[in-house]
Structure formats: C-alpha cells, structure tokens
Amino acid sequence: MANLAVTIQESIQLNGWNQGYTHTQYFTGIENIYANSGTLPVGTSCILYTTATSSWYGNTLDLDSIRFMRVTNMSTASVAFTGSISGSYSASVSGSSMLRLQVTGPSGNSGFSLGPGDSFILTRHSGSFQGNHPGIGGGAVYRNITGIKATAQGGHTTYQLRAYGAPTGSTS
C-alpha cells in the first residue's frame, strides 16, 4: 500500500501582499491506480469510467474505495469568457477544445465544462451526488456517482484521468 499527497497551491502577490494559499490532503492505503488518457475527435464521447460495489476492474471502479479522482483537459488553446454583471456568462475557445463532463447518478446527471488546462476533482463518490436538484437544501438526497462520460466540443480534445483507490476504512 502507498500514501498519496495532493497539494493545491495558489501563488499571488496583490498590492505587495502575499495572498497565496497551499492545501495538502493525504490519502492513506492506496492500492489501486486507474490511469486513462486519450484524444477525442470533435463531437465524440466516451465513458471515462463507471462505478460498482466491490470491483476495480477495467474502467469499473469500486465507488466506496475511490479516494481521489482528477480529469484534466490537456488541450492547449485560449479561452475567451464574456459576461455581464447579472451573472450570465459564456465561453468560447479559439481553435480548440472544451471537454464536457457528464457526471451520472441514480438521481440524474450534471454537466461540467473544462476549458484547456482545467481540471475536475472528486474526493468521494459514495453519497456525494444529487443531479437535477435546484439546490443543496430542501430535501436533496445525496446518492452515489455511477459514472463519468466525456465529450469533445469545439475541436479534438486531449484528456488525462487519474483515480486512486484504497480499501474502505482507509483515511483521508
């Protein structure tokens, strides 16, 4: 077994003051690593992985053992954001590629859009998802994530996926 350390570091000097922050999270007892990368032609989709109980085989991962998962859009292009103060924003990519993620669960789906260089991170799959719900209160029941699908939009999109698993009861 191995231990995984994940560090997120923000580095910024603003008005002569260091406003950066570093956070490290440790995951113990790692026994499984799932790595997947590829390039999706524009308009195509693929299932990055699905979850099940007591399985870590192929692209089916044990939902109770996933301690850390990251998917990154490895494509290079510039992203231009336009918006208004009212909160309506849109993004366009020059010459390349948005990676659209569809996170699925028994309660529905949620979509996430990753521009070039963006990452999506999850540290828990069991009991952590509520799709198609208008908010976090008012009867939201959080269920298991059952899979993640990726679609390329705007150009060929290169992605990288890493997932790390440890037996139930290992700490993070």
Image: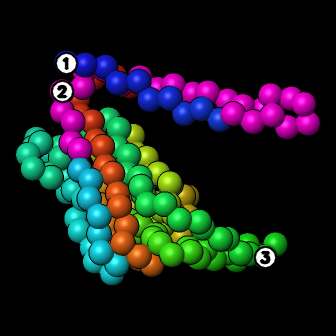
* Residue 164: percent from left, percent from top: 27, 36
Question: Relative to 75, does residue 83 appear above or below in the rendering?
Answer: below
Question: The residue tagged with tag 3: helix, strand or loop?
Answer: loop
* Residue 86: percent from left, percent from top: 79, 75
Disc number for residue 31: 2
* Residue 16: percent from left, percent from top: 90, 30
Question: The residue tagged with tag 2: helix, strand or loop?
Answer: loop
What whole-number distance in Å separates the C-alpha atoms at marks 3 and 2?
Answer: 47 Å
Residue at 41 percent of width and 76 percent of height = 155
Question: From this viewpoint, which residue is outermost toward the bottom?
Answer: 43
Upstream in sequence: badge 3 or badge 1: 1
Answer few, some or many: residues within 10 Å of disc 3's Cα (few below 14, many 20 plus, some between 14 and 19): few
Residue pointed to by mark 1: 1
What whole-number distance in Å separates the C-alpha atoms at marks 3 and 1?
Answer: 50 Å
Badge count: 3
Residue pointed to by mark 3: 84
Question: From this viewpoint, which residue is outermost toward the right?
Answer: 15
Residue at 29 percent of width and 64 percent of height = 39
Answer few, some or many: residues within 10 Å of disc 2's Cα (few below 14, many 20 plus, some between 14 and 19): few
Residue at 30 percent of width and 55 percent of height = 145
